[in-house]
Amino acid sequence: MSVLSSSLFEFTFSLFVFIILTENSSCLAMFSSKITRIPRELRVDYYAKSCPQLEQLVGSVTSQQFKQSPVSGPATIRLLFHDCFVEGCDASILIASKPGSKELAEKDAEDNKDLRVEGFETIKKAKEVVEKKCPNVVSCADILAIAARDFVHLAGGPYYQVKKGRWDGKISMASRVGSNIPRANSTVDELIKLFGSKGLTTQDMVALSGAHTIGFAHCKNFVSRLYNYRGKGQPDPDMNPKLLQALRMYCPNFGGNSDIVAPFDATTPFIFDHAYYGNLQSKMGLLASDQALALDPRTKSLVQDFAKDKQKFFQAFVAAIDKMSLVKVVRGKMHGEKRRDCSMHM
């Protein structure tokens, strides 16, 4: 915050709120099951013969979406996190609930209700394009992993190779979501335990949290930090006073517009860079779970390292998202399927 004047910050923040409201917003936060050994069939060139144009086909959609609706980027990246953290990277997040069914699909779980439609639309469009060229070949799970990578790169982040060969999962249950998704107020202990259950290290967790370098969160995810942190009737002392003042303008303690969102990274919210970590050092983390990373001795040094060195962050992020994208991968007809419509089981 030291590099921004208060007036500039308020103007910038107001602009972001306006942009999101005019898009009829409903937004953001992040990411379930134990990582397994990489199946030998999972490889970068998996579709080299069956669908050699796959990356270009998906790229034609992601590049267009990025230009027309930049929020598609963080929405799709978040979609991958929420998919992988619940029963593995199997596109189960994309399944729509059946009308009249007693068990809702993952998509309709309470913790997923803020997932933006732009993420789902991106995968739907990409699947349609791929199906025209390569019918019944490419899984929705692979398309989601590729699209998320595309958006990281389009927003200024690193380009990395995506291993492919996932099948789509046959199970999607809302009841499995709650215990597998990080909370806006998760402690570092809780985050380390949750990420560890997926085979991810503390460094992986801090690097993946850097995805909050782009995107937005609704007021409900941080409003307690503004007025009644931990039930003490006072704001979070670890929030920058200027950020606190700006956020209070748009997020009242009671009432207010439920569609209003704020950027995770108030300095460069549409650029995938390492500013998120510098913001944490300046007490400008939006969520309590973000700010905690700069305070806990187990994660503080990683925040410092990534704040200093963008390439170090990029390298750690690529390694971490590659590991995450291999969590509990589904293979073969016994456990998986290749959906034509990503929202419907075969």
Image (cartoon, rainbow, N blue to C red):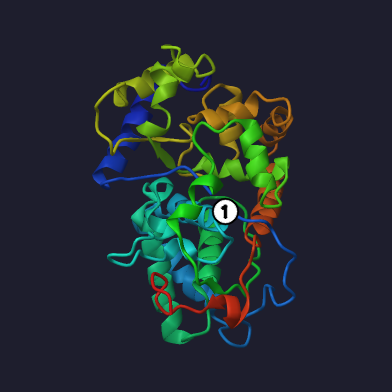
Q: Where is residue 192 in the image (x, y as percent from the top left)?
A: 67, 39
Residue at image location 30% in from the left, 45% down from the top: 25
Judge from the rendering whether residue 35 lies leftward or rightward of residue 99; answer left or right. right
Give the answer, above or below, for where 293 lies relative to 208: above
Asked whether 73 or 39 is in front, the reply is 39
Q: Where is residue 147 in the image (x, y as percent from the top left)?
A: 50, 63
Asked whether 119 or 54 is in front, the reply is 119
Residue at image location 43% in from the left, 64% down from the top: 94
Q: Mark 1 points at which residue?
A: 85
Judge from the rendering whether residue 320 lies leftward or rightward of residue 232; answer left or right. right
Give the answer, above or below, for where 153 lies relative to 302: below
Q: Where is residue 28 in the image (x, y as percent from the top left)?
A: 42, 44
Kind of residue sitting beneath label 1 = Phe
Q: Position of residue 206 (x, y in %)?
A: 65, 39
Asked whether 261 or 167 is in front, the reply is 167
Please rate how many residues cluster around mark 1, counting C-alpha atoms within 10 Å: few if below 14, some from 14 to 19, many from 20: many
Residue 230 seen in render: yes
Q: Which quadrant of the structure image shows residue 289? A: top right
